[in-house]
C-alpha cells in the first residue's frame, strides 16, 4: 500500500499526519473500543503500546485531536480502509487461513448519527420544532405518520427508517452486510448500504459472492438464515 500512502501526502504546506499513523490509530480505536478521537489522542499520551503500534516515539508530540479528525478525510477520499482490509484477506489467503469455497452471509442494521427529530417531511424547508432553542427544539410526533416515502433526515438524507424485526423499534439506520468464510470466521466482504428494496440482504449477498468470484474465490456453498428466502432464486 506504499504507493497509495505516497499519493496521500501533501506536497506543500505544513507536514500532515502520515496516513500510516492515521490508519493504525483507527485500527486501535476499533479494537479497544475507544469512543472518540479525543479520547484516543489522550490515551496516546501515556499508553506505550499505542505509541509503539503507530510508530510514535516516546519524545514525539501526540497530534491534536482536531487535526486527527480533519486528516481522516484523506482515508475516506482514497478508500484506504477498503484497500487495507482487502490486503488483510489476501494475506490470510496466502497463509491458508481462509476457505476459498464455503461462506456464510448475514445482515444487520447500524443506527446512524441522527436524531429522530431530524426525520422531517420532505416538503418542509425548516425543522418545524419549537422549544428552548433552534439547536435542539421540542418536537411533538403524536398522531403523525412517518415513512421513508414522505420523510427524510435533515442530518443525513441517506438514512432510512427501519427496524430489525416485528415489534422492534424503528430507527434511522443503514444496512450492514457481511460475508464470512467458514474455516476461521474471517470477514471477507462487507458493505454498508441504504435500507432499500434494491439493497436487500439477499440482493447484496448475491453481489458479494459475485465479487468474491472476481477476486479469485471459488464459492461452492453459502449459508444464510431464514431472512434470505430469495437467495436461491436470485442466484439461479
Image (tube, grey):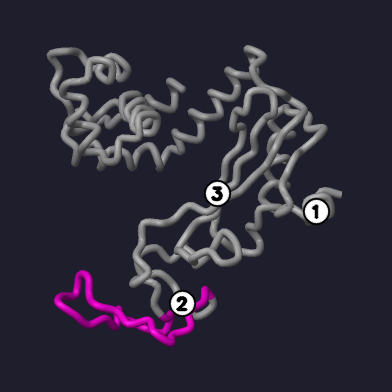
Q: Nearer the viewer, mark 3 or mark 1?
A: 3
Residue 151 disc label: 2
In this view, the residue in front, 72 or 187, is 187
* Span colored in magenta: 121-148
Image point 82% across, 32% down: which residue? 220
In this view, the residue in front, 159 or 9, is 159
Which residue is tagged 3? 176
Which residue is tagged 1? 234
Q: Is residue 63 left or right of residue 150?
A: left
Choose the circle earlier in sequence order: 2 or 1. 2
User: For the residue labelled by badge 3, is the local secondary structure a helix, a strand or a loop?
Assistant: strand
User: For the residue labelled by badge 2, is the local secondary structure a helix, a strand or a loop?
Assistant: strand
Choose the circle earlier in sequence order: 3 or 2. 2
Instruction: Report the number of numbered marks.
Output: 3
Query: Gap in Å between the C-alphas at discs 2 and 1?
Result: 31 Å
Q: Quadrant of residue 179?
A: top right
Image point 26% across, 81% down: which residue? 129
Amino acid at each position: 500500500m506504499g504507493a497509495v500512502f505516497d499519493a496521500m501526502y501533501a506536497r506543500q504546506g505544513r507536514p500532515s499526519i502520515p496516513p500510516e499513523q492515521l490508519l493504525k490509530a483507527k485500527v486501535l480505536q476499533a479494537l479497544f473500543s475507544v469512543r472518540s478521537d479525543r479520547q484516543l489522542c489522550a490515551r496516546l499520551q501515556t499508553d506505550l503500546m499505542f505509541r509503539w503500534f503507530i510508530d510514535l516515539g516516546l519524545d514525539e508530540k501526540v497530534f491534536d485531536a482536531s487535526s486527527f479528525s480533519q486528516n481522516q478525510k484523506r482515508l475516506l477520499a482514497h478508500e484506504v480502509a477498503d484497500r487495507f482490509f482487502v490486503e488483510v484477506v489476501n494475506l490470510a489467503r496466502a497463509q491458508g487461513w481462509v476457505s476459498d469455497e464455503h461462506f456464510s452471509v448475514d445482515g444487520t442494521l447500524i443506527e446512524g448519527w441522527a436524531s429522530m427529530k431530524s426525520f422531517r417531511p420532505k416538503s418542509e424547508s425548516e425543522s418545524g420544532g419549537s422549544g428552548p432553542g433552534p439547536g435542539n427544539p421540542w418536537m411533538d410526533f403524536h398522531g403523525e405518520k412517518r415513512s421513508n416515502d414522505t420523510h427524510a433526515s435533515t442530518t443525513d438524507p441517506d438514512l432510512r427508517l427501519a427496524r430489525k424485526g416485528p415489534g422492534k423499534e424503528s430507527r434511522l439506520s443503514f444496512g450492514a452486510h457481511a460475508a464470512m468464510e467458514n474455516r476461521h470466521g474471517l470477514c471477507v466482504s462487507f458493505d454498508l448500504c441504504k435500507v432499500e428494496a434494491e439493497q436487500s440482504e439477499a440482493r447484496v449477498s448475491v453481489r458479494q459472492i459475485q465479487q468474491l468470484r472476481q477476486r479469485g474465490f471459488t464459492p461452492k456453498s453459502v449459508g444464510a438464515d431464514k431472512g434470505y428466502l430469495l437467495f436461491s432464486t436470485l442466484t439461479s
